Image (tube, helix red, strand yellow):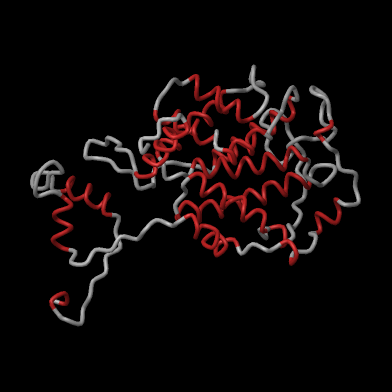
Amino acid sequence: LLVNTKQFVVVLAIDTQYVTLCLEDAYKYILDPKRQPSGLDYIEKIIQLPYRVPPIGNEHMKSYLQDQMNAKKKETRGPSKKEEESSKRARPNDDNQSPGQPNVKTPLLPGYINVDEEAPAKPAVAMPTEELDFTWEELEMLEDACVLSCVGPRAGKRLVNVFKLMKIIWYRRDQDQTPVVDTPFELRMKDACVLILALCASSSKSLRLGMCKVLAKVEQTRSMPVGCDNLKVFIERTLEEGGAGQATNNLLTMIHDEKCSRILEKVVWGEDEEKWNLTRKDLRLSRSFSFVGEYSEPVDGNGIHHPSYTDTLINLKANHVCGLNKFN
């Protein structure tokens, strides 16, 4: 009765794709996706004025993330307590170490639990609130990763939360190390983790499937991988082992992008097993904060995936890279 009154308006915020599938499942003997009436016909009969929320544009990604992160510009953020303490200590430069030379910093990752060894419990130390603040550089780093990986607003918000949690984990880890400061390798690894998280949260199903393959390989690789000394080569080799396919080709195209390639190539462990262990543990941590299954995947009633708009763009980009631009 209320719907029939002029003063009453009903606003429905729904995901048309999944509501359609649910209707066709609940009324399978009436609604059929292959003929009329379908689930979409049912929705169109009810909704008089549809409005689709457009995807966030690349030009608006930074302002959207800034609303979530409240990043501080460099000139307005003073040195943190951790940085002040670290400035009094000598900082090792792992770039100057020869291949195979062990890192002087021990222990490597006391913040992680070693099931084979019992580590003495240490009293918890309060984390300075300024350590949770995002810097402007971290905002721009996450923006680049989100734009590059075609991340949607919901996934972008989740990445901000995951990024903050990882900052806490990294801070706790650093507090147990001497000196209390990141080495150049650790800084590059953190940049790579942000990119990996964004690739795992991409709106492209093929990219996420490719990353699932890569991170599964990380779980299986206990010792140092043979024949590759950096993260980019490791990803390439892993994808090539699985054979050709849409997921493999799209992810290969992505990691060959200039920005993406530059980040992954800098994570070099060479013959240093300690650096590889750090890489593996941080990638496993990234995998723990990633999952697949809540994205707007175009599927039919049989669960068959159809290429999304994002997948189409990536395919066009791949063709262009290979010199097969269809628009020429």
Outermost top residue: 226
Residue nearer the viewer, 182 or 289: 182
Q: Quadrant of the N terminus?
A: bottom left
Q: Residue furthest bottom?
A: 7
- Whether 201 is drawn above or below 218: the answer is below
| In-front residue for pair 164/245 | 245
Q: Is residue 82 left or right of residue 252?
A: right
Left/right of residue 281 with respect to residue 151 in the rendered view: right
Q: Position of residue 263 (x, y in %)?
A: 64, 39
Q: Which quarter of the picture shows residue 74?
A: bottom right
The residue under the point 80% across, 33% down is: 95
Quarter containing the C terminus: top left
Q: Residue at x 62, y 56 (%)?
A: 139
Q: Is residue 71 above or below residue 102?
A: below
Please tell me whether residue 70 is drawn above or below residue 307 in the rendered image.
below
> How far from the left and from the top, in percent, is residue 20?
21, 50
